[in-house]
Image: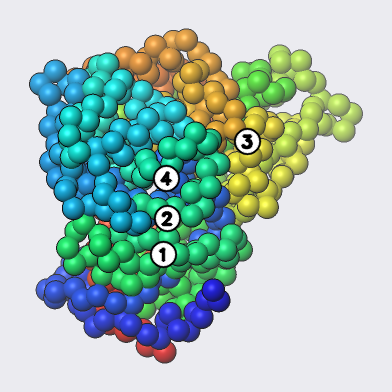
């Protein structure tokens, strides 16, 4: 199949009223079907199965192809999806899901409770967020449309874990073949029960999804097709958006790109839709690799990095400083931790004490800093002159694409890497996975890739995962943050000022707490694009 972009752009856009995102919202007309939506990204998709892989690139696709038990609105409230209703037992140790009775997979096979039970088991065994479903002991299936999750203890994050980007329901009849789920052939030719079905994938170039006309929500989705194009860099994406060859960009964090988009009159720019993501920018250390296996070396680097300079001059004041692993805006966030204000004298003293004196050339040792293309490269390049001030020679290693970077980091073949991590709505889901000793899993990206181990941290995270009292839970997370900040398995830089950009003419913009990592069944075209 050859993609004819002009054909996609010129045909089939229905004249519908757009849903405004600010003051003066228009009265919404009845959405009409038709048209193609083109999204842009720089990330190369490894596969489409969000049950075994995290990340925004996987989330774009997985949330369209696979349905989940619940979805969320923009107020953090769970909404029916594959589960038309649900109930948590008084003791918090079971969750009963009542599934819709008309859901079909894209091959026509009905979705049943056995698919839910199978998918939860797959996620527990394969997903990098090991704590997310750890309390789920069994899933009972008393009938085809009832699934009962039995928990070992109350789990305050259990409903959040049923979100589209976290719990895709896989077809058991396709995936239950005894093969490794991470490399299963169906990951590249997926069959789900979501609003859009898979059509074609040309890795590194594009993939195409098509409307599933037997989707279980009547009349949806409104769009005929979704195309996701992969381009080499942010500038290419912006140019294609300006030309209207791409209609949507998301996870935009570069300050210059945001400023440029603000000047375009035909573009809707918003920072809404990332509330559930809780994105953080950081440096991650391989705590088992010399010389960063020494906490004094990690602390020295933390004292050398000028967070305020970075925020002011690189992010241009658009991001908030971040001092710990829980994102700014979370009810569990605290800044009452060691903030590592720049102190080169202290940094040098720590390196001396760690046994790394400066040589005649002023260099103590060399470090490789890994990163992916784009925003992460900016941070890596900043570290080279900054760490030189304390005698560390930095080699920047930019991977060709996300899969190459993920392979290196997940196999612990690195010393420092620039990364961004999502809180995913609750620390149990998006934070604990990075620090639990039990989640050191070789080959699994965005697990505990720092190989960090601290029994007290494990204990605190286990306690917080079962504590329903908010005040007590907050106190536990405060202590946890103090420990990990001081031991520096990761050095936190900032919240990430993610934005989305949409061409004018789209209605029902995806502005729930999960943004573009939500099903796009409600998005429609208000007006045709002007060519």
Lower sequence index among marks 1 and 3: 1
Measuring from the top left, give residue 447's x and y in whole percent. Answer: 50, 30
- Rendered position, 510 above or below 62: below
Real-space Cα distance between discs 4 and 2? 18 Å
Residue 88 image-quadrant placement: top left
Which badge, 3 or 4, is on the more N-terminal residue? 4
Q: Nearer the viewer, mark 2 or mark 1?
A: 1
Q: Do the residues labelled 2 and 1 touch (CB within 8 Å)?
A: yes
**Percent position of residue 438, x then y:** 48, 18
Q: Distance between the residues labelled 1 and 3?
A: 30 Å
Given this view, does label 4 or label 1 mark the residue nearer the observer?
A: 4
Which residue matches tag 3? 409
- For the residues labelled 4 and 1, the Cα–Cα distance comes to 19 Å
Q: Nearer the viewer, mark 1 or mark 3?
A: 1
Asked if 44 appears above or below 522 in the picture, the reply is above
Residue located beneath label 1 in the image: 209
Q: Earlier in the sequence, mark 4 or mark 2?
A: 2
Say if mark 4 contacts mark 1, CB within 8 Å. no
| Snapshot quadrant of residue 163 | top left
Mark 2 sits on what residue?
61
**Pointer 3 with pointer 2, Cβ within 8 A:** no
The residue mark sitting in front, 3 or 4, is: 4
Left or right of 255? Residue 364 is right
Residue drawn at x 48%, y 55% as measured from the top left: 189
Give the mark nearest the N terminus, 3 or 2.
2
Callout 2: helix, strand or loop?
A: helix
Number of the front mark, 4 or 2? 4
Q: Quadrant of the C terminus?
A: bottom left
Q: Is residue 130 visible?
A: yes
Residue drawn at x 20%, y 38% as measured from the top left: 144
| C-alpha separation, residue under disc 2 versus residue under disc 1 | 8 Å
Q: Nearer the viewer, residue 264 or 519?
A: 519
């Amino acid at each position: 199949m050859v993609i004819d972009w002009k054909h996609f752009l010129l045909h089939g856009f229905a004249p519908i009223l757009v849903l405004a995102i600010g003051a003066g919202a228009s009265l919404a007309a009845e959405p009409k079907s038709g048209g193609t939506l083109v999204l842009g990204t720089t990330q190369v998709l490894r596969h489409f199965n969000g049950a075994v892989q995290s990340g925004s690139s996987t989330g774009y696709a997985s949330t369209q192809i696979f349905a989940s038990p619940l979805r969320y609105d923009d107020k953090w409230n769970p909404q029916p999806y594959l589960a038309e209703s649900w109930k948590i037992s008084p003791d918090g140790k079971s969750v009963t899901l009542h599934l819709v009775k008309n859901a079909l997979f894209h091959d026509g096979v009905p979705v049943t409770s056995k698919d839910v039970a199978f998918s939860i088991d797959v996620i527990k065994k394969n997903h990098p967020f090991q704590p997310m479903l750890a309390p789920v002991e069994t899933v009972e299936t008393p009938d085809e449309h009832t699934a009962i999750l039995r928990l070992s203890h109350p789990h305050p994050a259990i409903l959040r874990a049923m979100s589209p980007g976290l719990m895709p329901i896989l077809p058991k009849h396709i995936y239950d073949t005894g093969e490794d789920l991470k490399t299963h052939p169906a990951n590249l030719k997926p069959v789900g029960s979501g609003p859009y079905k898979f059509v074609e994938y040309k890795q590194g170039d594009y993939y195409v999804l098509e409307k599933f006309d037997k989707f279980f929500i009547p009349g949806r989705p409104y769009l005929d097709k979704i195309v996701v194009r992969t381009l080499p860099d942010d500038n290419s994406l912006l140019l294609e958006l300006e030309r209207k060859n791409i209609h949507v960009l998301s996870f935009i964090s570069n300050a210059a790109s945001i400023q440029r988009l603000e000047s375009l009159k035909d573009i809707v720019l918003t920072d809404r839709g990332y509330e559930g993501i809780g994105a953080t920018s950081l440096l991650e250390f391989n705590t088992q690799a010399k010389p960063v296996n020494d906490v004094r070396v990690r602390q020295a680097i933390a004292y050398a990095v000028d967070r305020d300079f970075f925020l002011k001059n690189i992010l241009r004041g658009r991001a908030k400083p971040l001092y710990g692993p829980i994102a700014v805006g979370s009810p569990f966030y605290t800044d009452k931790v060691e903030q590592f204000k720049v102190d080169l004298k202290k940094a040098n003293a720590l390196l001396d004490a760690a046994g790394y004196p400066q040589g005649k050339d002023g260099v103590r040792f060399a470090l490789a800093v890994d990163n992916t293309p784009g925003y992460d490269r900016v941070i890596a390049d900043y570290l080279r002159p900054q760490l030189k001030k304390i005698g560390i020679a930095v080699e920047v290693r930019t991977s060709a694409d996300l899969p190459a970077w993920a392979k290196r980091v997940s196999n612990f073949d690195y010393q420092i890497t620039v990364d961004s991590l999502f809180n995913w709505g609750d620390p149990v889901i998006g934070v604990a996975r990075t620090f639990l000793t039990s989640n050191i899993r070789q080959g699994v990206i965005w697990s505990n890739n720092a190989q960090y181990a601290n029994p007290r941290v494990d204990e605190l995270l286990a306690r917080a995962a079962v504590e329903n009292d908010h005040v007590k839970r907050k106190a536990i997370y405060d202590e946890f943050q103090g420990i990990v900040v001081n031991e520096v398995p990761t050095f936190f830089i900032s919240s990430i000022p993610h934005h989305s950009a949409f061409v004018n003419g789209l209605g029902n913009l995806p502005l729930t707490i999960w943004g573009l990592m939500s099903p796009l069944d409600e998005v429609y075209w208000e007006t045709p694009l002007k060519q």
